[in-house]
Image (cartoon, rainbow, N blue to C red):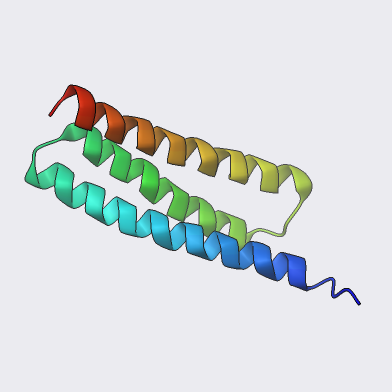
Amino acid sequence: MRDPGLQPERTALAWQRTALAAAVAAVLLLRGGLVRDAPLEIAAAGCAAAVVVLWFIAVRRPPTTGSTRRVLGAATLAVAASGVLTAVQIVLLP
């Protein structure tokens, strides 16, 4: 027995978890960047905050295949950029 409403609900819950984790990461990165005067961490916080903005966009728009893929791709790039900026800050600019 299949319920067609379950898959969109799971997707929405996954977006919520991702947005919450990104918001927490953004706050921690911003705080760490301001305390240690680390501009790359502040930029990484901006990338993490972008994921939260993308979540709002994904929730507010009616889902279409093209728009969903673009938002997901943008969120993926924002998370990757945040990770790279944080790694560069930690490794190259201690």
Q: Please report the residue visible at 56 percent of the width from the left and 55 percent of the height from the top.
A: 57
Residue 4 as seen in the image, left or right of residue 18: right
22 displayed left or right of 42: right
**Residue 85, percent from left and from top:** 31, 31
Lateral position of residue 26 relative to residue 2, left or right: left
Instruction: Report the front residue among 15 and 53.
Output: 15
Residue at point 12% right, 45% down? 34
Position in image of residue 18 (x %, y %) = 49, 57
- Tell me: 86 left or right of 3: left
Q: State the residue at coordinates (14%, 35%).
A: 38
Q: Is residue 1 above or below residue 60?
A: below
Name, please, the residue furthest toward the top.
Answer: 92
Image coords of residue 71 (percent x, y): 60, 45
Of 25 and 1, which appears nearest the observer? Answer: 1
Q: Would you identify the image quadrant in which residue 82 lies?
A: top left
Q: Residue at x 28, y 37 (%)?
A: 43
Instruction: Give the percent coordinates (x, y) of residue 29.
Output: 24, 47
In the picture, which quadrant includes the N terminus?
A: bottom right
- Residue 6 position by quadrant: bottom right
Above-or-below relation of 28 to 59 = above
The quadrant of the picture occupied by the C terminus is: top left
Number of marks in the rendered image? 0
